[in-house]
Amino acid sequence: MPSTPSSIPITFDVLRSEETAPVTLDFADNTDVISTTRWRVPRDLDNDTALRTRAADAREFAMLAAKRWRHYRDTDSAARSLPDLQRMIATDPHGEYCFHLKVTADWFPTSLGGAMIRRTWCHHLMIDFLFVHPRISGRVENVKGVGIGILQGVCSLARELRCKRVWGEATRDSAPFYQRQLKRVVEDSFDLNTAEIATFANQIAEGNQSA
Amino acid sequence: MKTPKPRSEMTKEELVAHLKEMYAAEDYFTGVLGNRNSFFIAKPLRRKKAVAKRAAKTTA
């Protein structure tokens, strides 16, 4: 694996109540992952079934991701940093590994979102779970750009690792998002090729304030 | 997406407009990506314990 300057952590801007606000995307460690299991659905949403459901989904996805993290952690296949992941890949190029990403900001008390990513045996990245904090998905906090920022960050890592594909599953709820973002019809799966990976990686790179 | 000029040279208003365009798809983002139904943990399924056949009683 070539040792080029790391693309992560990445500091980029999201929109917070129509103003720019910096956030940082980085690898998550065990404490970060487990802390998302303490997320709660905001009481402010008790009277809004639709947004409450969104917030509950975000909480559930964070918990499912943490549960899967424990499995990979306990089987020594969870990476806590990019060098960690590169070392694992160098040791066994066909191994399957997992890592979590987190988005943090000094203006938000916990992480704003995260993702559980798998590096598959054929060196592709698979997005298993991606979620934003229930206060954001439930629109208690008006923050925009965390989800897309994570997606762009995954592409940035894929480019650095020279992965030829980033893929994932699309559901009835998430397919419209992917269709809009990828500008093509998406059914129950999507995959980004090298050119698309580069496009998304460039989008986050141009705003990277850590570089 | 084309960037008219480097972000560092954008005014605050231009940067907000640029981010709004870049994050437009988030209007369709429900807050989660992935599928909860794909979730599994490598944990063996419960299986019924094999019951040893008891030898038939024989009566003399």
Image (cartoon, coloured by chain):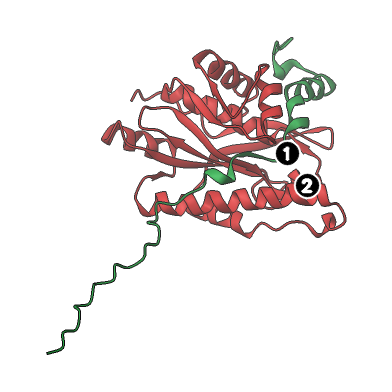
Chain colours: A red, B green
Image coordinates of residue A171 in percent, x first then y, are 63, 35
What is the number of the mark on residue A145?
none
A129 is higher (above) or lower (below) than A161: below
Image coordinates of residue A58 in percent, x first then y, are 67, 48
Residue A155, image quadrant: top right
Classify mark 2: residues with Cα within 10 Å, few (<14), some (14-19) or many (20+). Answer: many
Residue behind mark 2: A138
Residue that extends furthest to the bottom in the rendered view of this protein: B60
* Three-letter amino acid code of the residue under disc 2: Gly
Quadrant of the image containing the N terminus of chain B: top right
Q: Is residue A85 left or right of residue A64?
A: left
Q: Nearer the viewer, residue B40 or A110?
A: B40
Residue that extends furthest to the left in the rendered view of this protein: B60
SS at mark 1?
A: loop
* Residue drawn at the location 61% of the way across and 48% of the way down: A61
* Three-letter amino acid code of the residue under disc 1: Thr
* CA separation in Å, label 2 and label 1: 9 Å
> Could you tell me if residue A41 is visible in this image?
yes
B21 is higher (above) or lower (below) than B34: above
What is the number of the mark on residue B30?
1
Q: Is residue A105 left or right of residue B49?
A: right
* Residue drawn at the location 42% of the way across and 52% of the way down: A71
A78 is higher (above) or lower (below) than B3: below
* Residue drawn at the location 66% of the way across and 56% of the way down: A39
Image coordinates of residue A205 in percent, x first then y, are 59, 22
Mark closer to the observer (2, 1): 1
Quadrant of the image containing the C terminus of chain B: bottom left
Classify mark 1: residues with Cα within 10 Å, few (<14), some (14-19) or many (20+). Answer: many
Q: Nearer the viewer, residue A204 or A50?
A: A50
Residue A163, image quadrant: top left
